[in-house]
Image (cartoon, grey):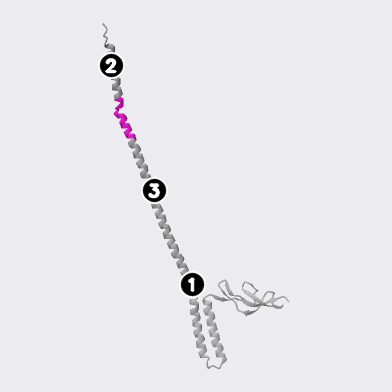
């Protein structure tokens, strides 16, 4: 004899099994753990990125401060150097002739002595001797500081060192030869302080 409640019982059991399966899916502990782990990884990555950005910013600030301090020191050193150079130039212009003047003072002393020595002298030879002595001393003092006399007589005329104030037609000298020095010229190294005034031979 067939059980009339058998179909209803099986249908009821199937519904209960389906409900249990649905409940298991909703409260799956593994699914919850996976979601939590992904969330933690995202937060950790974000924190690492922020830390890296802060570290890079601190490094840039440190590099900037270092370069800025170096610039300030260099600017101060250059300003001090410029001031020293200006002081040295001013001192050179003001006291550059000091050694020369010290040598010339000795010559002035001898002029004073010579003036006293010839005050009551009637012998011209002694006066001439004293004059030549002082003149030689003056030339020696100027030579020590670099003053040179420009050689000219018998030399070929050179407009860099000579100034022709006279020209004499003659056959005794080659053309453009200096035949007479009218005023001495001087130079310091390769710089002409004053050209020689000369008389130059020209063709007749």
Residue at mark 2 = 12
Quarter of the rendering containing residue 67: bottom left
What kind of element bears circle 3? helix
What crowding class fits label 3: few (fewer than 14 Cα within 10 Å), some (14-19), or many (20 or more)?
few
| Residue 69, placed above or below residue 54 | below
Tell me if residue 32 is in the magenta stretch. Answer: yes
Residue marked by disc 3: 57
Asked whether the viewer can see residue 39, the reply is: yes
Residue in view at x 29 percent, y 21 percent? 19
Judged from this view, the residue extending furthest toward the right is 204
Q: Position of residue 14 (x, y in %)?
A: 29, 17
Query: In terms of secondary structure, what is the magenta stretch mainly?
Result: helix
The magenta span reads 24-38
Q: Position of residue 176 (x, y in %)?
A: 68, 74
Q: Which residue is mark 1?
A: 92
Q: Residue at x 52, y 89 (%)?
A: 115
Indicate whether residue 40 is drawn in magenta: no
Residue 35 vs residue 80, the one in the foreground = 35
Q: Residue 15 in the image: state x and y as whole percent.
A: 29, 18
């Amino acid at each position: 004899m067939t059980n009339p409640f058998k179909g209803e019982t099986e249908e009821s059991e199937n519904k209960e099994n389906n409900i249990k399966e649905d409940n298991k899916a909703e409260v799956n502990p593994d699914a919850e753990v996976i979601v939590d782990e992904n969330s933690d990884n995202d937060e950790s990555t974000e924190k690492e990125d922020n830390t890296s950005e802060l570290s890079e910013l601190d490094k840039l600030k440190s590099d900037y401060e270092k370069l800025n301090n170096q610039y300030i020191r260099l600017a101060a050193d250059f300003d001090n150097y410029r001031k020293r150079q200006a002081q040295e130039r001013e001192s050179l212009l003001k006291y550059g002739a000091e050694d020369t003047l010290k040598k010339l003072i000795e010559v002035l002393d001898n002029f004073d002595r010579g003036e006293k020595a010839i005050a009551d002298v009637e012998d011209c030879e002694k006066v001439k001797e004293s004059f030549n002595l002082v003149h030689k001393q003056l030339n020696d003092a100027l030579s020590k500081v670099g003053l040179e006399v420009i050689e000219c007589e018998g030399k070929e005329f050179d407009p860099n060192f000579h100034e022709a104030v006279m020209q004499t037609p003659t056959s005794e000298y080659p053309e453009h030869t200096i035949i007479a020095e009218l005023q001495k010229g001087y130079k310091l190294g390769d710089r002409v302080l004053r050209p020689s005034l000369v008389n130059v031979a020209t063709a007749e």
